[in-house]
Image (tube, rainbow, N blue to C red):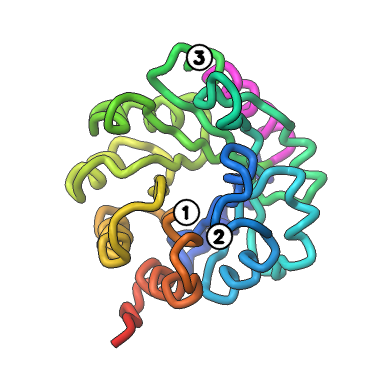
Amino acid sequence: MLGTTIRLRRVFPPDRPRVFAVPLDHSVSMGPIDGLEAAAPVVGELQSAGVNLLIVPKGAVRDVATALLPTTLLGVHLSASTSLGGAPDHKLLIGTPAEAAALGADLVSIQVNFGIAQEGAMLQDLGSVVDQCRSVGLPLLCMAYVKRSGGGTPEEIRHACRASADLGADIVKTSYPGSEAELARLVRSTPVPVLLGGGEKSGSTDDLMRRVSEVVRAGGRGICIGRNLFQRQPIGPLARRISAILEGRPDPAPS
């Protein structure tokens, strides 16, 4: 457990209580989508703008390794499915925490989709990965989503996050539960740090910035957003605004 504790302290150091994470695993599930045709250039721009955790599939580590700054945390995502398959919401394990550690990971992540027929299999995978993470000292981030109409009710989202934490996840990422009050309730009922995901690109930039501010006010420990960031060009100015809000600085909004 000491390794997990030490690495979690790097994710949430006392002088930076919130994390700005960007997942770049969409190339597996969706292909080389707009904004992510090549990973390395995106990585450079994100880091210069204040992103401190990047999450990639294990094979993509080779593409981003030379671009990673010494201060940037690396997450390796161990779940996969593709939109080409017949059950894209059924995430399968495609690696181990030991492999991730050998690649230089600071943490690993997996995804569990609640509310579908394969939920039990994914929960079983979560339990297995929790045990493996403990043996190699890596924190585990669980991306917990409710795959029902509308993305789940606030109660269902709270259930998914609490279940993920109680089964051993060290950090939980999930979807927006509908309001700042519900987000604060979610944070209170989840005994590990909660990160807000971005989902598919939607809404305006102002809407995105309001949601980041809600995370801070509700006690969330950061964000983990992909398409809602890297599919908005230019990336740099928006990422710098997000970073400022997460760090408690004034929003350097363009005039």
Q: Amino acid at mark 2?
A: Gly
Q: Where is residue 154 shown, x and y percent of the image? A: 24, 33
Q: Are marks 2 and 1 in contact (CB under 8 Å)?
A: yes
Residue at which label 3 appears:
118
Q: Earlier in the sequence, mark 3 or mark 2?
A: 2
Work out which quarter of the rendered image holds the C terminus and state it.
Answer: bottom left
Residue 83, given in percent of the width and then of the height, sits at 56, 31
Q: Position of residue 231 (x, y in %)?
A: 48, 60
In this picture, which residue range is highlighted in magenta? 123-137
Q: Residues within 10 Å of mark 1 (few under 14, many from 20)?
A: many
Which of 147 and 136 lies nearest the eye of the viewer? Answer: 147
* Horizontal side of residue 155 vs 232, given as left or right: left
How crowded pointer 2 is (Cα within 10 Å; few <14, some 14-19, many 20+) is rated as: some
Disc 3 versus disc 2: nearer the observer: 2
Q: Nearer the viewer, mark 1 or mark 3?
A: 1
- Mark 3 burial class by Cα count in 10 Å: few <14, some 14-19, many 20+: some
User: Could you tell me the amino acid type at mark 3?
Assistant: Gln
- Work out how far the residue at label 1 is from the one at label 3, CA to CA, in angstroms: 26 Å
**Type of residue at label 1?**
Arg
Q: Is residue 134 magenta?
A: yes
N-terminal-most mark, 1 or 3: 3
- Which dot marks residue 227? 1
Direction from residue 216 to residue 140 in the image, left or right: right
**Would residue 22 be visible to someone looking at this image?**
yes
Quickly name the residue at label 2: 35
| In the foreground, 173 or 208 | 208
**Residue at 70% in and 64% down:** 40
Residue 25 on the magenta span = no
Magenta residues: mostly which secondary structure?
helix
Residue drawn at (44%, 33%), measured in percent from left and top? 144
Residue 173 at x, y percent in the picture: 44, 42
Q: Quadrant of the N terminus?
A: top right
